[in-house]
Amino acid sequence: MAAADEQQLIQHAKEGNQQAFRLLMERHMKQAYVLACRFVGNSDGAEDVTQEAFVKVHAGLASFRGDAEFSTWLHRIVVNIALTKKRLDKNRTERHVSIETVQIAAATDDEFHKREQQAHVERALHELPTLQRAVVILRHLNGLSTKQVSTILQCSEGTVKTHLFRGLKKMRSKLEYLEEGIG
Amino acid sequence: MKHSEVQNALYDFLRNEISEEESKNIEHHLAACKACTEELNQLRYALALLPSPSADPAEGKGKEFFDALALRIENKIRQQQSPRSNPLTEFAEKVRSFVTLRPSYAYAFGGTLVAIALAVFFVVRQPEEPVEYAGKEESVSDYELAHFQAQQRMSNYLQKSKTLLVGIANMKQDDRGDADFTAERTLSRNLVHEARFLKSQPMDERSARLLQDLQKILVELANLEETNDVPNVEMIRSGIDEENLLFKIRMAEASFDTNRSTKIY
């Protein structure tokens, strides 16, 4: 079963084979978790998003027609859940930043500077408008192609390019004060 | 190439993810365009700030972590035993996805719906059908119509009472010998019955008092013997005079006439 083709795995899982679904999960779990992490910015939240995403995948597997790749479909579900969670948990972001600060306090000077800068960058990233943030994460951090991103976000490739450019430009202006630190 | 085309392609240009021909076109444009060159520098700076795409947020999370997560997911699926998705849940999911990714469109759509709902609400609340009265059309509410009808009945009541009392007051001495009061009794009983309805309607204090005074006389008249009840008629005549009822009725009628000329009815 481990060597089975993904289409076959999906078909078996659709028919109610729990082992097939488990294998599908194992193949895509890390990918989904990493994407969730980049969207919500913390491990606990990413676990919740991954869990909810696979529960949704299981519930909606019967309606998956295979028009897009399974991973693209999974990405879309993860992105939707993560964005919803992010919006609902907006206040928790501040708590997350304060945890980062505690970790920074225990680090050396170089690490302190690096982590502080990282916290600023992450905050600027999460302050971007929803679609721009999604495009930057999917296209730049997750390394998906423009076409894959456009399929996940259900928009044109031109829109993906425009939002990527605008998102990065906005980050640049938000982080102008860090310019001196860049070599 | 247009500036916007160049700027949208700058990311792919920096990462060498475009064709050689397109790359040359961009280089050619950048050589002559300061604005796009500045955008390229800003983009380069932004990319230097961002975490490296190779940075792994799952670093340190081993197989055990993901196995435990998979187990939790399987348990949750078993707990929920959620029904397979149907077209309705698929539609709800699409709506949720749309709202999440494009909140501005969702707000605009919501605003339009609210505007339509308000417009429908105000159209539905337009005034009632116009009521035709005395040859001219007026828009009146149910309350105004009921009030108008009550006033009409009050006016009729006063007119009939006046006719009855005038007849009694003007009865000649000669007629009283073999008088037949059947018609007066019937009319009085009808008026007593009508007065019960009028009392239940809102009215000014003077009209209420008049109604009360009239009621006493009308009850007396309604209780007359059918024939030769002259002594009682004499008492009623004196009651009419004492209470000055005919004058009060005329005053009340004049008041109604004034109201009709100043109000919509």
Image (tube, helix red, strand yellow):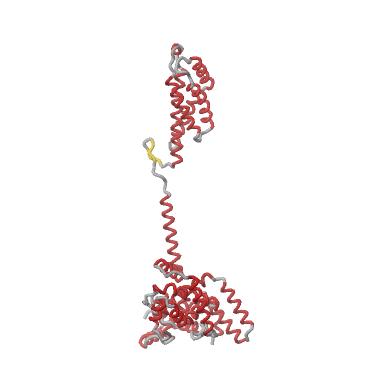
Near-viewer residue (B29 or B222): B222
Work out which quarter of the rendered image holds the C terminus of chain A and state it: bottom right
Against B206, is B232 above or below?
above
Against B120, is A96 above or below?
below
Residue A9, quarter of picture: bottom left
Residue drawn at 46 percent across, 37 percent down: B147
Against A43, is B261 above or below?
above
Near-viewer residue (B149 or B29): B149
Q: Check the image and name the residue furthest to the right.
A: A106
Where does residue A109 sit, x and y in percent of width and height?
62, 86
Near-viewer residue (A99 or A17): A17
Work out which quarter of the rendered image holds the N terminus of chain A and state it: bottom left
Residue drawn at 51 percent across, 20 percent down: B240
Regarding residue B3, the answer to whether it shows in the image is no
Q: Is residue A171 left or right of residue B87?
A: right
Where does residue A165 sit, x and y in percent of width and height?
44, 79
Where does residue A134 sit, x and y in percent of width and height?
46, 76
